[in-house]
Amino acid sequence: MKYFFLSDGWTYGRVWSSEGLWNDATWRRKPHIQRLNLYFLEQNEQLWLYRVEDAILTVEVKPVAAEQIERAAGAIGQVVLKRLISGDQVLERLSAAETVCQVKNIQSVVF
């Protein structure tokens, strides 16, 4: 599995695999991307942990809300391509942050 963190007010868009841009018809399914019930706070911003399947190499992320789009356009543009990280890198990041876990279903966070 691979992971990435995504701020509230942002969503993912296009997905790339080793063959290029993800094609639902070729793969015969949508990519497996799941938001877990775990986030950490960084400068009063909630960064949620997402889990993706190994076939995914890169995920496009972009703001959803109009105010987020305006703020992103001034700082970094409207779209960012996100590098995925390993489970070890997730643990390193979480151990150095103020982390909150909301467990409604323990199976959703147990691997």
Image (cartoon, helix red, strand yellow):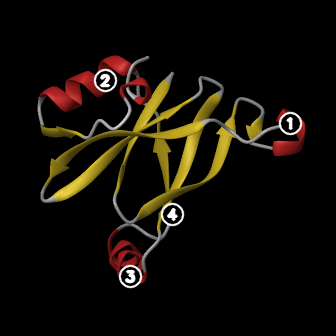
Q: Amino acid at mark 4?
A: Val
CA gap, disc 3 to disc 2?
30 Å
> Residue beneath label 4, please?
79
Write down the residue under mark 2.
89
The 10 Å Cα crowd at callout 3, few under 14, some 14 to 19, many 20 or more, is few
Asked if the residue under mark 2 is in contact with the one under mark 3, i.e. CB atoms within 8 Å, the reply is no
- Per the image, label 4 sits on a secondary structure element best described as loop
Q: Residue furthest front?
A: 104
Label 2 or label 1, whichever comes before in sequence order: 1
Around disc 2, counting alpha carbons within 10 Å, would you say few (fewer than 14), some (14 to 19), or many (20 or more)? some
Residue drawn at x 51%, y 21% as measured from the top left? 1
Q: Which residue is mark 1?
A: 28
Nearest to viewer (mark 3 / mark 1): 1
Q: Nearer the viewer, residue 71 or 37?
A: 37
- Relative to 47, is 82 on the left or the right? right
Secondary structure found at label 1: loop
Q: How many C-alpha atoms fall within 10 Å of the one at disc 4: few (<14), some, or many (≥20)?
A: some
Q: Secondary structure at mark 3?
A: helix
Circle nearer the N terminus (3, 2): 3
